Amino acid sequence: QKEVEQDPGPLSVPEGAIVSLNCTYSNSAFQYFMWYRQYSRKGPELLMYTYSSGNKEDGRFTAQVDKSSKYISLFIRDSQPSDSATYLCAMTRGWSQGNLIFGKGTKLSVKP
Amino acid sequence: DVKVTQSSRYLVKRTGEKVFLECVQDMDHENMFWYRQDPGLGLRLIYFSYDVKMKEKGDIPEGYSVSREKKERFSLILESASTNQTSMYLCASSSPTGSRYGYTFGSGTRLTVV
């Protein structure tokens, strides 16, 4: 079983839709969870960061962590064509030198 | 604004050439990483370094080496480039506690080996 699983998509939605992106993981020791956004031919940029379980909201973006189910989500409200990108989840145990474990990314396309 | 700078956006090299990919960060970060990214395979860790002169193998080190002579610079070396090393190469950095807060990535180098 892979440590982090993420549906690669592609996911295509109309402008204004609510988008749900998800990752599951197997290691219960993960405590820090991140979402990266990667535009075509660019490096990933950190979008959201959460610690442990719960929700975190930033504008149109909400990150949700359910540690009991080992499941994390990123919701995008009122999606825009500029949200078209690949979204990668990432997580770590939190040790000072523990590396991030990444999902493979979900490609999202928001159609005008 | 913190930055990780990769020296080239696009490179075309011939099979058998020695290739150097350079990465510089201005955040005084101790930890630096090299990944390659391929469709369907995601990010794969090649090498990483937690300090100057230190290096650790990642998941796919074969065919690569690295050099970290200065804290801000981490170089990836393809000793003898092969076509299966055609890929997007991404450099990243973080502070020692920074894995909890994510990495900062460069813009990437798209390498084509012909």
Image: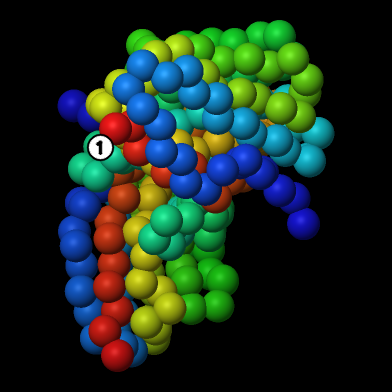
Q: Quadrant of residue B31?
A: top right
Q: Is residue B23 visible?
A: yes
Q: Residue at x 74, y 15 (%)?
A: B69
Q: Residue at x 55, y 30 (%)?
A: B21
Q: Quadrant of the N terminus of chain B?
A: bottom right
Q: How many numbered circles does the render carry?
A: 1
Q: Nearer the viewer, residue B33 or A63?
A: B33
Give the answer, above or below, for where B6 lies relative to A108: above
Three-letter residue code for mark 1: Leu
Give the answer, above or below, for where A82 lies relative to A30: below
Q: Tell me how the rendering is colored.
A: rainbow
Q: Is residue A92 visible?
A: no
Indicate left or right for B5 with B36 as reference.
Answer: right
Q: Chain of mark 1?
A: B
Indicate left or right for A16 with A38 as reference.
Answer: left
Give coordinates of residue B62: x percent, y percent: 36, 11
Q: Quadrant of residue A30?
A: top left
Q: Residue at x 43, y 78 (%)?
A: A82
Q: Quadrant of the C terminus of chain B?
A: top left
Give coordinates of residue B61: x percent, y percent: 40, 14
Give coordinates of residue B64: x percent, y percent: 44, 15
Q: Nearer the viewer, residue A48 or B1?
A: B1
Q: Quadrant of residue A69?
A: top left
Give coordinates of residue B17: x percent, y percent: 42, 19
Q: Residue at x 61, y 23 (%)?
A: B75
Indicate left or right for B22 with A12 as reference.
Answer: right
Q: What is the crowding at mark 1: few (fewer than 14 residues within 10 Å), some, or many (at least 20)? A: few
Task: Please tell me whether mark 1 sits on a helix, a strand or a loop.
Answer: loop
Q: Which residue is mark 1?
A: B41
